[in-house]
Amino acid sequence: MCGIVGYVGPRNVQDFLLEGLRRLEYRGYDSAGTAIIENHHDLLVTKSVGRIANLAQRVTGSSDDCQIGIGHTRWATHGAATLVNAHPHVGGENCLAIVHNGVIENFAELRSQLVSQGYSFVSETDTEVIAHLLSEQIRQKTGGDRSGTTYPRELGMEAIREIMPRLRGTYGLAILFKDWPETLFAVRLGSPLIIGVGDGEHFVASDASPLAGFTDQIVYLADHQIAMISEDRLQVSHRDQGPVAHDVQKMEIRSNQVELGDYEHYMLKEIFEQPESIRNTLRGRLNHDDATPVFGGLNLSPQELRKVKRIVLTACGTSWHSALVGEYLIEEIANIPVEVEYASELRYRNSPTEAETILIAITQSGETADTLAALKEMKRKGHPTLAICNVVGSSIAQEADGGVYLHAGPEIGVASTKAYTSQCIALTLLALYLGRLRHVSYETGRQMIDQINQLPEAVEKALQTNRQVAEIARKYHACDNFLYLGRHYNFPTALEGALKLKEISYVHAEGYPSAEMKHGPIALVDLNTPSVFVMPTGFIYEKVMSNLEEIKARGGPVIAIAAQGDQRVADVADDVIYVPPTAEFLQPIVTVIPLQLLSYHIALMRGCDVDKPRNLAKSVTVE
Ligand code: AGP
């Protein structure tokens, strides 16, 4: 949450900052702001409440004599979404400007110390504390001398280094000092920061998306590192170790991947990208000769994996739903016991774990604070950790001992769609891989690989339901309550369908195992509460059909997601959306497609901002 950009170089600074912030807007959109230095000494801060479009109207554009600036888009944590709370925040006597992603947990204590030292605060944010703390540190180092005496910029670096131990919490910061108008400073602990290296220019961003089309050379700043950045020089220091070398890596993202193209919304674009994103997750990972998936980065040998007695899957939100799919898959295919834990709970529980337990964290962004903390805790206890992650080089990807990248491409829509199906497919591959290390036969392995290979085509066909789904959405979009029901592999699909609807259309929806609804939720059923049944043909079909009849007997409208060729369901359900029949272990990846589309169309019809739902941010980097 919160997006940061920074730039030093010959381009029009405000133009880059605004474009970068537009691309980061999915990380938060409560308010936005920029700070630039003009004419080598004028620190100019512009802020607005709401979207980047509002900020763009206020920003006047930077003069030719401006080479440096920082920008921020906010997801409010401390203090409401007001102009004073918008970033950048300035330090004492306007000597510096700062943008922050993260949370300073001891800000109240620091704030009262600073107040007693004579600092006054204009905002309610934790960030303003850092701004004043840093200006106080500079004041102490220079003896308060602001008479124009030139101090080297290393003094700024030194001041940042010195305040770091006093900050408890997480931060990614970009900082401009009025006294060093050619240098941009960046520092991180627990919140991501990337530096883009160009020809005579440098960029700073919370993630790679603002850099696409500007440079493909990037440096991932690590925790406790401070970067001192000018047009043509990047120096990185570690808080305790002093200067450190930095690796410049090639970025995978292309600019067309972060553009909308012909689509009206990123969510719709990403829904329709799924056949391709699934192919990308599968690419190079199916070995037909050995009838097994293969992975390059697990960093655990087959011998080590054979000894695993339990797998803990941890994640948040939609990724937690894919973890549930993973639980069914791994237990069914590999016969290894699996626990699925909310990352936010796992971290603080003290559940006994056998030595031969591995942890797998599942995350699109790789930056979710709860997931990162849970992974660190399990690592600390000595368990091997893996990450199933979309964003290359993200904090969780770096922290895990090994893992699987999804290669689904950037996911910009706040509602996760293509990352979810890629997570499910990565877990399917992992389940089969583990199964083939144990009891799954060569022949079964071959058969499953053939079925997996047909998946992108099945998803393509499922996407063809779009028009029909839009008609169904028109029929039900005014309803204020929905039930989503499914069993076995399709129980997590029901949860995911309900979450999609809730988060983008603000409609109340409950996901349940369909048999479980008899134990309470059935009381919600009435003429205006549709039940969405996820019920492709399979061993549990008859049972789900009985659950459907139970709803119909109480007058509830039913929308069924069923397998092509199932005529029976059409006689009882009010509306049926047919998807291609697939092997049961692959069904969740196909049945979720119409549910994604349903939530999209309902949200549109209710006038909601599909890509930027209220109160949400794409990456939740606070606990
Ligand atoms: C999904 O639509 C949500 N935006 C949210 O639940 C998300 O899946 C969750 O915050 C976890 O994010 P991650 O996958 O990036 O860790």
Image (cartoon, rainbow, N blue to C red):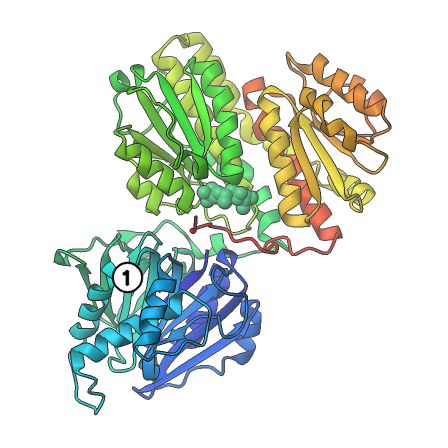
Give the image quarter of residue 565.
top right
Residue 460 vs residue 380, the one in the foreground: 380
The residue labelled by disc 1 is 187
The reply, left or right, for residue 457 in relation to residue 546 is left
**155 relative to 404, above or below:** below
Secondary element type, mark 1: strand
Vertical order, 376 against 6 (above or below): above
Mark 1 sits near ligand 1, with its Cβ under 8 Å away = no
- Percent across and percent down for residue 259 are 52, 57
Q: Position of residue 441 (x, y in %)?
A: 41, 7
Instruction: Report whether residue 563 is seen.
Output: no
Which image quarter: residue 523? top right
Left or right: 476 as drawn, with respect to 15 = right
Q: Amino acid at mark 1?
A: Val
Residue 246 at x, y = what percent?
A: 19, 55
In depth, the one of 489 and 451 nearer the eye is: 489
Identity of the residue drawn at 53% across and 33% down: 321
Label 1 packing within 10 angstroms: few (<14), some (14-19), many (20+)? many
| Residue 569 in sight in this render | yes
Residue toward you, 572 or 258: 572
* Position above or below: 484 against 23: above
Exactly how many numbered labels are in the figure?
A: 1
Q: Residue at x 17, y 81 (%)?
A: 142
